[in-house]
Image (cartoon, rainbow, N blue to C red):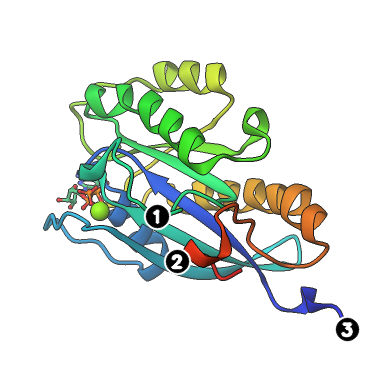
Amino acid sequence: MSDRKSPVTLKIILIGSSGVGKSSFMNRYVNHRFTNMYRATVGTDFLSKTINIDGEAVTLQMWDTAGTERFQSLGTPLYRGAHCCMLVFDVTSAASFSALEEWRKEFLIQGEPQDPQHFPFIVLGNKTDLSHREVSVSKAQHWCGQVGADYFEGSAKEDLDVEEPFLKAARGGLQQYKKHTLENTGHFQITCKQPRETRNTCEC
Ligand code: GTP
Ligand code: MG
């Protein structure tokens, strides 16, 4: 019996500076809720959602990280085994956009994806409902072109274009899963390079 009948679980990591709206975007997507109140994420949190991709059930396990812990090792293999990484910035904050380069580098160092050149990155510009924009679409797209990422933007607050980036993440993550996780194991398992004794975030 094949265990492919149960949905494939894809690990999607959301990273980016504090206050850009990572938690809000994820909450809007999964729970269809939004609040103007800011409560900084402490440590990490994850939400799951099962969707259908071309007739295949896929569970997205979305890891929401704390922006304030930027560039610091969390001491856990958090980024390892990720199938897609979403780099989130605020379109009204040039600083949050500039920081993406560091976030990306840090992900590649800590996450150690098997094929970094082809690892799926999604860049997400949030807060398009606000008028005082500091990062243009063309500027964001230009950088994405340089690093080989897909660009999306939207608003968690106004529920604008929230689904598309996650769909793209699911597609990219599924490809990653089929190429690396399945090829390596022959069956469903989240790839984890950490020795078994010290794993604490993977189910494998
Ligand atoms: P950390 O957990 O500290 O890393 O922050 P975060 O990236 O998770 O940001 P969070 O989702 O907590 O949002 C920060 C603030 O921005 C909150 O006050 C949200 O209400 C607000 N916010 C989030 N998304 C939007 C949006 O699309 N538009 C507007 N106008 N505000 C937003
Ligand atoms: Mg948060």
| 171 horizontally vs 134: left or right | right
Q: Nearer the viewer, mark 2 or mark 3?
A: 2
Q: Callout 3: 10 Å neighbours few (<14), some, many (20+)?
A: few
The percent coordinates of residue 85 (x first, y second) are 50, 44
Q: Quadrant of residue 192?
A: bottom right
Residue 1's label in the rendered image is 3
Q: Residue at x 26, y 38 (%)?
A: 17
| Gap between marks 1 and 2 measured at Cα | 7 Å
| Horizontal side, residue 190 vs residue 165: left or right | right
Q: Are marks 1 and 3 in contact (CB under 8 Å)?
A: no
Query: What residue is shown with label 1?
Result: 76
Q: Residue at (13%, 54%) from the top-left corner?
A: 38
Q: Residue furthest right?
A: 1
Q: Give the Cα distance between marks 1 and 3.
A: 34 Å
The residue singled out by tag 2 in the image is 200
* Mark 3 residue element: loop
Figure quadrant of the N terminus? bottom right
Q: How many marks?
A: 3
Of marks 2 and 3, which one's residue comes earlier in the chain?
A: 3
Q: Are marks 1 and 2 in contact (CB under 8 Å)?
A: yes
Instruction: State left or right for residue 39 relative to residue 161.
Output: left
Near mark 1 (Cα within 10 A), the count class, few <14, some 14-19 or many ≥20, is few
Is 145 located above or below residue 80 in the figure?
Answer: above
What residue type is disc 1 on? Answer: Thr
**Mark 1: which secondary structure?**
loop
Between the C-alphas of marks 2 and 3, the distance is 29 Å
Q: Amino acid at mark 2?
A: Asn
Left/right of residue 153 with respect to residue 94 in the rendered view: right
Which mark, by number, is residue 56? Answer: none
